[in-house]
Image (cartoon, grey):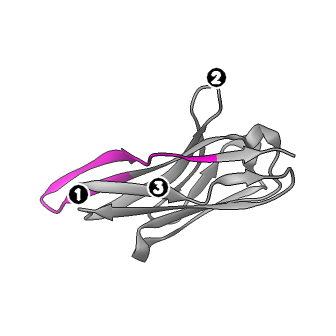
Amino acid sequence: QVQLVESGGGLVQPGGSLRLSCAASGRIFSIQSMGWYRQAPGKERELVAVITSDGNTNYTDSVKGRFTISRDNGKNTVYLQMDSLNPEDTAVYYCCADIRTFTWRPLSTRYWGQGTRVAVSS
């Protein structure tokens, strides 16, 4: 059993900053990658950023230069530092991770967090 727990969401004014955290716990052998998706009201869920086990990162164009993804492998935790926030960033942000749970089973499973709300408004 694996759980992903997000934290750090909230209400912030335009131009402000937030730092999201997501910690994975449970039966974990290894984590291949961790990332963040978001879903705005009435919109499809979109990938925001992803980081692999070797540290490679990718971002959607709309957040490049403003958001930074990082991870602490020892704590099984991924972070998303969000700066220069604007109203278009308002969404529920979901953490995800591709996790191998058994040493004898070389397959990974996609797990999702429950989501944390981010609202950017004056």
Between 64 and 121, the one nearer to me in the picture: 121
Q: The N terminus is located in which quarter?
A: bottom left
**Residue 107 higher or lower than 76, as above or below:** above
Q: Residue at x 78, y 38 (%)?
A: 88
Q: In the displayed structure, does residue 31 sit left or right of residue 51?
A: left
For residue 69, what is the image quadrant?
bottom right
**Residue 40 higher or lower than 64, as above or below:** above
**92 in the magenta segment:** no
Overall secondary structure of the magenta section: strand
Mark linked to residue 101 = 1
Span of residues in magenta? 98-117
Mark linked to residue 34 = 3
Which is more N-terminal, label 3 or label 2?
3
Q: In the displayed structure, does residue 99 sit left or right of residue 16?
A: left
- Residue to which mark 2 is pinned: 42
**99 in the magenta segment:** yes
Q: Residue at x 33, y 64 (%)?
A: 25
Task: Check disc 1: other Cα within 10 Å, few if <14, some if 14-19, many if 20+.
Answer: some
- Check the image and name the residue furthest to the left: 104
Residue 80 position within the rendered picture, expressed as x and y whole percent measured from the top left = 62, 59
